[in-house]
Image (spheres, helix red, strand yellow):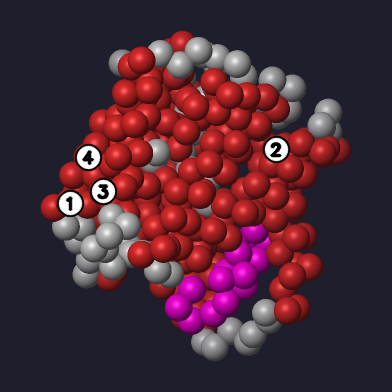
Amino acid sequence: MHQRSLTGIGLAVAATACFAVLDTTVKTVGAVVSVLLVIWFRYLFHALAMTAWLLPRRGRAALRTAHPRFQLLRGVLLLSLSLLGFIALQRMPVGEFTAILMVTPLAVTLLGATLLDERVTAWQWLLVIGGFAGALLVVRPVGSDIGWAGLLPLAMVFLAACFQILTAKMARTEDPLTMHLYTGWVGALVASALLPFVWQAIPDGRTLALLVLVGVAGTVGHLLFIFAYQRAPASTIAPYLYAQIAFAMLLGWVVFDHTPGSIEMTGIALIVLCGAVSGWRTVRNRPVPIQPPED
């Protein structure tokens, strides 16, 4: 395999590790402070870090965009994803949460057929049905401790698919780093407007350190993915995105002493199988990129 592609794969796997750290830290610190305060830290760090890094290199060109309304919509979508995700993480294990989100490429297939008027083959329908069946095994509406919270990542799958379709359309005219910059500021400004209603004092230095880690993990993770897609095609990277499930399950075991049961593991395996195959076919057949779920 070409060295550049290997570098892209390595960056993508490192990014999935960052997102697993992000979700685990959010679950930990969200038990101490308001979820909205966690979101505010995550996006403020993102916005300030990207501004400090990008503006000295590109100046005003970093702010140039042909579609400011789409930039706003993209930022609101990602903020909504974070809000739902951070709430869900307080009520369900990290590994199972991550596995359900990996149904997103399958949802992109369906939205591509709906919004882009694309034909969905019998194979694609089969993979979509299989992936959602796996998600139901993970959630288990009957006989599961997760309960209604399992519906939150399923709602996120739909929002994430919309986010990816919009990103694919914008990527034709917009610079990825500029999009990343605007996404951070939209999230930071909206969260700042809501923050006075839920503000609370940060109780100790450990909590502050965890909040900073949330910002670092989210920002670095997204940057690593941008760099990964610059070095390797999405079809090459897509199968390795499922490493995030392994990292999430490992951290869930280390930090929370939780391991999925046999039914959940069956559902996770089904999601990985159907999602990986569907993602590869999607990237091969059309220009909608398969990206990881965003937090």
Q: Is residue 94 above or below residue 241?
A: below
How far separated are the C-alphas under marks 2 and 1?
39 Å
Q: Nearer the viewer, mark 2 or mark 3?
A: 3
Residue linked to disc 4: 269
Q: Secondary structure at mark 1?
A: helix
Whether residue 11 is visible: no
The amino acid pointed to by label 3 is Leu
Q: Position of residue 123 (x, y in %)?
A: 33, 16
Indicate the amino acid at tag 4: Ala
Q: Is residue 64 above or below residue 126?
A: below
**Residue at 54 percent of width and 80 percent of height:** 33
Measure the alpha-carbon separation of dots 1 and 3.
Answer: 6 Å
Local crowd at mark 1 within 10 Å, few (<14), some, or many (≥20)? Answer: some
Q: Is residue 203 visible?
A: yes
Report the span colored magenta: 30-49
Sequence-earlier tag: 2 or 1: 2
From the viewer's perspective, is the residue at label 2 or at label 1 nearer?
A: 1
Find disc 3 in the rendering and name its residue: 137
Q: Nearer the viewer, residue 253 or 111?
A: 111
Q: Nearer the viewer, residue 64 or 137?
A: 137
Tell me if 94 is positioned left or right of 266 in this view: right
**Contact, mark 1 vs mark 4 (Cβ under 8 Å):** no
Which residue lies under the disc numbered 1? 263
| Sooner in the amino-acid sequence: mark 2 or mark 3 | 3
